[in-house]
Amino acid sequence: MKFPWQPLLERIDSQAWLRFFLALAGLALAFAAALYSIIFRDQGNLLATAIAASLALMLAALVGITTVPYLARRVSLPRLRERFIYEGTREGAAFIILVLFIGIGALNSGNNLVYIVLSAMLAAFLMSGVASAGMLRALELDVALPVHIFANRKLLARFGVSDRRRWAPAFSISVKALERPQRQRRHWQPGIWGWPPWQPPAKQRLRLRDWVYAKVPSAPQTPPIFSGSVYFPYIPRRATAGADVELNFPRRGRYSQKELGLSTRFPFSFLIKTRPVAFSRDIIVYPSVEETEEFFQALPMITGEFEMFVRGRGHDLYLIREHMAGDSARHVDWKATAKTGVLKVREFTREDERKLRIVFDNPSPSAVSEPAYEASVSLAASLAWHFAQSEAQLSFAGQSYGGGEDVYDFLSHLATVTPTDGASLLDDLAVSDDYNVILTARPQGSIPTRLWACSYFLFIHEKEAAVL
């Protein structure tokens, strides 16, 4: 059953309306306190006058600081909504307290000089906001990031801020990330009890109080690209100031940044004013390609087996030579060995190029732990990156990999891959002229026999990616 007022209620911002009515109540109390301060002053009660006037000013200031900016950010006009973000400072708080004391003194004394001082302080506060707003509107932001990014590897990003004004430079500008919490969506849904309770559930009529205003869980957020701040003390007019910022991404995956902010305390540091800047950027962070212990254990074995496979693949006899360490026993020439009394082996010509295929057989979540899975992904990326620098012709395979032979396409696939419950890739993997390096969590007894002669296997265990 659909609640008839559900679409209307979902569009109502309950928090904004609550702030609005609290602001009205606060202003009503401030007005009442101001009226009582006049009454107490006419009666000659100075203490009560000071208390009532202070209460009126504090209530008005509290409403202005906590409610007005909050409601202004929810104005539907695009030119006004979230134009600036305001943050308080200790200097600004001290200045407001001083303004309140001087205002109380002006109300109690009626001295024109005190009113002039109060007006000058309020004008300075207002002009500070106007000056900082005008400065931020004339600035442009540009960020340059590297094309290829690896996890756990430091990189430099270039942040540039341009001042487009012809007449004045910019002072005390900061570029910072805006961390805005996601607003939880709500919707009306039926409660547990129906009416009347003795009828079957299909015939029960729901009352208004049986509907629950429930929260809708928000989707997980993508980690941000930049989360710090960059400070520019001075930007010349019609010029660009740049700064190199060191970034380091601890994990592989997708990172996203929707907006950054240009903020300033200029000129008096009463408030930190921030102008949001659209910065829609998504990057893929490749797995780490560091030379780990597993990499050093696997690389010599893979290289030796690959060289033996390539060397013995031809069919035309090239030469007969003495046996050397690392030669396969299947290439021993027994006739030449019997004649010479020295162990001889046959060497064949190579018919094609050195072809290597790296296969990542994605395991199921229950077959491997998260540390072992991350270690296997990093090992696959390290092997792909290492052999991409050699003369071998590389190709790649995976359950959901649809890229070509470019190593960056395979690294992008490994950057976002997750364990899956799909079928293993090895059952349908065709035997070709390539030598295979296969990372899998399947037990040895379940490996197809046709792959043993042309493959090297790295088995993923529960605690680490062990090389067998």
Image: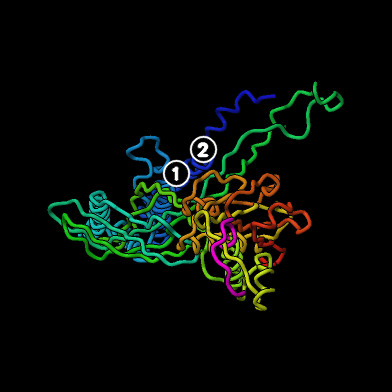
The single residue placed furthest to the front in the displayed view is 339
Residue 194 visible to the viewer = yes
Q: Which mark is residue 61?
A: none
As helix, strand or loop, the secondary structure at mark 2 comes to loop
**Which residue sits at x=58%, y=51%?**
433
Circle 2 residues within 10 Å: few <14, some 14–19, many ≥20: few
Which of 248/399 is in front? 399
For the N terminus, the image quarter is top right
Q: How is the image coloured?
A: rainbow
The single residue placed furthest to the top in the displayed view is 203
Name the kind of residue labelled 2 in the image: Asp
Name the kind of residue labelled 1 in the image: Ala
**Which residue sits at x=37%, y=51%?**
85
As helix, strand or loop, the secondary structure at mark 1 comes to helix
Residue 187 percent location from the top left of the image: 61, 35
Residue 320 in the magenta stretch? The answer is yes
Which of 372/227 is in front? 372
Residue at mark 1: 28
Residue 16 percent location from the top left of the image: 49, 41
Which of 370/288 is in front? 288
Residue at mark 2: 13
99 vs 211, left or right, is left
Which of 397/45 is in front? 397
Residue 49 visible to the viewer = no
Please identify the quarter of the rendering in which residue 374 is found: bottom right
Residue 458 in the magenta stretch? The answer is no
Residue 92 percent location from the top left of the image: 34, 62
Q: Which residues are magenta?
A: 310-323
Please identify the quarter of the rendering in which residue 230 is found: bottom left
